[in-house]
Image (cartoon, grey):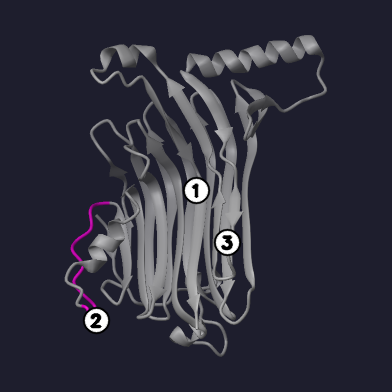
Amino acid sequence: MRRAVSLAITAATVAFGLMSPAGGAGTGGFHGFTSFDAVAQAQAATGYLFMVGDEEDRLAGARATINGPPAGSLNIAAAVQRGVLAAYTYGSIGKPESGEGGTLPEPPPGEANGLYPAEPRESTWQEPVTASAAGPVVDGRFTARASEDPTGFAEVVLSRLDVPGQLTVAHGVIRSRTAPAPGGVEAESISELFGVVIGPLRVESLTSRAWAFVAAGSDDVRTAVSTVVHGATVDGVPVRITNRGVELADGTMGESEKAELAGRVRDALAGASVNDVRLVDTSSVSKDPSSARADAGALRIVGRDDALGYANPQGLSGGGFEVGGASVSIVTRRR
């Protein structure tokens, strides 16, 4: 095991924009808010009704949260993120009502936490993690960081992700941050995955990004959200993946060739017990000038295996998982 704890400000911190805005250092950067909550979440994969767990379990998850007053920051980067509130549990243990730092229990293998006002402010884990004897393997570097400004940062530099019989990701970067921005507060999450393999489906790159900003002194609310799939093939046939499903990438071919290749794609997915592959719609919502939410859609895969259903006492014959995805949420109250 290799674990490092440090309070040093690294070059990566500056490069990713976690510095306080000019003229607004510390909590003064939130002048005009009586309260604020900003959350950013990204992951390599989310599982439901399959071997990773329920819909709140994530592989290679990065979550960054800031709130106040008083200023607080809770951040988690984990190989296996068991639900979205794990870091909150750690941060609250031994934390007095005065807002002073509490004691952080030792996190499970493959998890790094960064908290304020609790400790540690920064931690890093770097070592392969196996969720169970025949379960997912996640290898990479996991970093979480917090500061009194407050800022939040969580990052997974993924070297390899392997869910036997389900999913392989060659490498990627999953990153979430929340921080003061000039005149307000912002949150951003990015999931960049490369070499994604799901049975006969291959994807060169899958990028999800969600960003939001809420101003303190005006009604300025902004969001940006996108999901891009590049280089997708099924059994070697180039395809497009949209919210409607899998389509042939080349629309200029003749009808006979098109029918042949469409059948090849359909048979390849069916042979892997995959009956639905599609992109979840991206969305952004701002109900009022004090809040914003943005969700970058993930790649959703749903499968069915009747043999599994017959052998399972509960009759569970399928399930699914999502690859990629990023979301942010900001809720504020003004003076």
User: Residue 30 appears at what percent x and percent y?
Assistant: 49, 82
Secondary structure found at label 2: loop
Picture residue at 64% right of the left edge, 12% below the top = 263
Q: Nearer the viewer, mark 1 or mark 2?
A: 2
Residues shaded magenta: 97-109
Q: Main secondary structure of the magenta part?
A: loop
- Mark 1 and mark 2: Cα distance apart in space: 36 Å
Query: Which of the pair 104/6 is nearer the observer?
Result: 104
- Mark 2 and mark 3: Cα distance apart in space: 34 Å
Label 3 vs 1, first from the N-terminus: 1
Q: Amino acid at mark 2?
A: Glu
Q: Amino acid at mark 1?
A: Gly
User: Residue 47 appears at what percent x and percent y?
Assistant: 39, 37
Task: Determine if residue 122 is in view.
Answer: no
| Neighbourhood count class around disc 3 (C-alpha, 10 Å): few under 14, some 14–19, many 20 upward | few
Is 27 in the magenta?
no
Label 1 vs 2, first from the N-terminus: 2
- Mark 3 and mark 1: Cα distance apart in space: 33 Å
Q: Nearer the viewer, mark 2 or mark 3?
A: 3
Secondary structure found at label 3: loop
Q: Which mark identifies residue 287?
A: 3
**In the rendered image of this protein, does residue 204 appear above or below residue 128?**
above
Q: Which mark identifies residue 172?
A: 1
Q: Quadrant of the N terminus?
A: bottom left
Q: Is residue 94 left or right of residue 329?
A: left
Q: Which residue is mark 2?
A: 100
Label 2 vs 3, first from the N-terminus: 2
> Where is residue 46, by image quadrant?
top left
Q: Amino acid at mark 3?
A: Lys
> Where is residue 103, by image quadrant?
bottom left
Q: Is residue 97 left or right of residue 68?
A: left
